Amino acid sequence: MVRSALLNVMMGAARKAARSLVRDYGEIENLQVSRKGPSDFVSSADLKVEKTLRQELKKARPAYGFLMEEGGEIAGDDKSNRWIVDPIDGTTNFLHGIPNFCISIALEREGELIAGVVYQPLGDEMFHAEKGAGAFLNERRLRVSARRKLEDSVLATGIPFHGRDGHEPFLRELGVMMKNVAGIRRFGSAALDLAYVAAGRCDGYWEAGIKPWDIAAGIVLVREAGGYVTDYEGGNKLLETGEIVAGNDHLHQPLLRLIKSAHA
Ligand code: LIP
């Protein structure tokens, strides 16, 4: 399988940054942790990983800009290309010793997401995709699941918590979904939730109030694995609205209809 130079840069950066991440995971109790907001944390591990990713990506593409969870928006000389980076997606899991977190890197070109890497370092699962070239887990080509019925489907989602908005709307969505599907999972990492949809492990995913860096790479994975990803209106304003619905070609529209019915 021939990979593009672009994907090699992104995967190389993720693997390099993961070294300190796995080391820090082994000694979480010694990490410096500060509060960004209610029940929202950042640790010295997040900052270390983000610094390494920025250095590696800048070395390879000096003119590209960045949108990073901790560092924010950093304009580049080349206005057409922007890296969208989450150093640790699933930070709360990471800080609690729950082994479900990842590094997420996407490339946006001319406003379109064209490449994505989601690296789950503990399981050495490298999910990667590039527009028109398919989606892969390590060397294995990925396809979304073929399940056709909601009642056979397992969905992933994100649940708002202390200090977050959207509790009532989420409970309405959950109420409608749980009556119609075989199972709902809250894994704690939107990037891995989308990677699992691309891999056919989950049949769909929905969430509101989500950040661009949590979902950008995962969106490319699902689309290149033959799935559909839209905002709650069925449009493409995912990064702007922070509302996302993903599913295979049989289930995406029924999921959209259920979400609409929850807010009718
Ligand atoms: C997390 C997302 C998750 C969401 C959490 C949080 P973080 O990202 O992956 O889906 O429900 O609220 O946004 O903060 O670990 O990068």
Image (cartoon, rainbow, N blue to C red):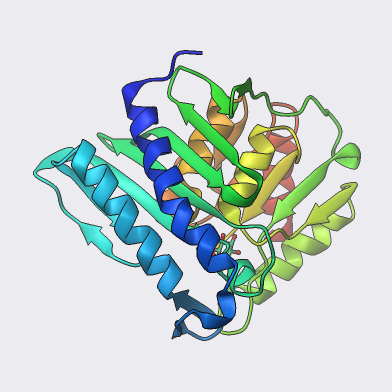
| Res 78 visible | yes
Q: Position of residue 248 (x, y in %)?
A: 69, 30
Residue at 25% of width from left, 34% of height from top? 110
> Looking at the rendering, which quadrant does residue 32 occupy?
bottom left
Residue at 66% of width from left, 57% of height from top? 100
Q: Residue furthest top?
A: 1
Q: Quadrant of the C terminus?
A: bottom right
Which residue is at the front of the view, 204 or 74? 74
> Looking at the rendering, which quadrant does residue 132 occupy?
top left
Vertically, is 227 above or below 156?
above
Q: How many marks?
A: 0
Q: Residue furthest left?
A: 77
| Res 241 visible | no
Q: Position of residue 189 (x, y in %)?
A: 61, 57
Q: Position of residue 35 (x, y in %)?
A: 46, 85
Residue at 59% of width from left, 54% of height from top? 190
Residue at 77% of width from left, 48% of height from top? 155
Vertically, is 118 above or below 157?
above
State left or right for residue 254 relative to residue 41.
right
State left or right for residue 122 relative to residue 50.
right
Vertically, is 180 above or below 29?
above
Q: Position of residue 223 (x, y in %)?
A: 54, 29
Which residue is at the front of the view, 261 or 38? 38
Q: Quadrant of ligand 1?
A: bottom right
Vertically, is 15 above or below 134?
below
